[in-house]
Amino acid sequence: MSEETKVPAFDAKDVSDNKVIACLAYIIFFIPMLAAKDSKFAMEHAKQGLVLAIAALIIWIAGMVIPVIGWFLIGPIGSLLVLIVAIIAIIKTLQGEFWEIPVIGKYRSTFKF
């Protein structure tokens, strides 16, 4: 695992103080960016929430644009997968953990905020 995709270490106080705000990143990614910009825990979840939102947008576009396969497979299955991933991430966040989303979570390191 490269240094960029390594799961970061967080201060226990930061985690306990900001886990509720951090979990909102998987619903609307920019909420932690506004409400807890000094929290490393919340910012990492905001980055990952942004990556998940981009993936959801790509799935939605592919589902709309690609005839038949997109309408009946890519769109519905992809949307369900995004929902399941978001629920798992919210649960892990509320437990005070950082769960890197498989496949796409590593791209959070491309965002520097």
Image (spheres, rainbow, N blue to C red):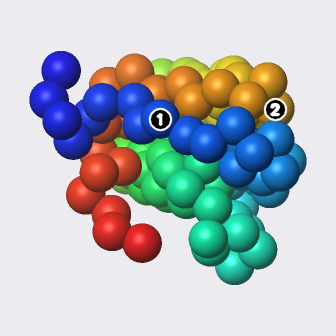
**Residue found 18% across the figure and 35% down from its top:** 3
Callout 2 crowding tier (Cα within 10 Å): few <14, some 14–19, many ≥20: some
The quarter holding residue 103 reads top left
Q: Quadrant of residue 113?
A: bottom left
State how many labels appear: 2
Distance from label 2 to label 1 (Cα)? 16 Å
Which residue is located at x 55 percent, y 40 percent?
Answer: 10
On screen, residue 54 above or below 2: below
Residue that label 2 marks: 94
Task: Let me know if residue 19 appears in the view.
Answer: no
Q: Nearer the viewer, residue 46 or 18?
A: 18
Going by the numbered disc 1, the residue's amino acid type is Ala
As rendered, which of 2 and 51 lies closer to the eye? 2
Residue 90, image x, y percentages:
75, 33
**Can residue 38 be seen at all in this image of the molecule?**
yes
Relative to 78, say whether 27 is above or below.
below
From what the image shows, is residue 43 above or below residue 100? below
**Which residue is most to the bottom?**
34
The N terminus lies in which quarter of the figure? top left
Q: Is residue 63 left or right of residue 24?
A: left
20 shown above or below 103: below
Pointer 1: residues within 10 angstroms few (<14), some, or many (20+)?
A: few
**Identity, as a three-letter code, of the amino acid under mark 2:** Leu
Viewed as shown, does residue 89 lie left or right of 47? right
- Tell me the number on the disc at residue 9: 1
Res 31 → quadrant: bottom right
Relative image position of residue 97 (x, y in whole percent): 65, 26
Helix, strand or loop status at disc 1 = loop
User: Residue 53: x and y, percent?
Assistant: 53, 53
On the image, the x and y values in percent for residue 15 come to: 72, 42
Please report the residue visible at 33 percent of the width from the left and 68 percent of the height from the top: 112
Q: Earlier in the sequence, mark 2 or mark 1?
A: 1
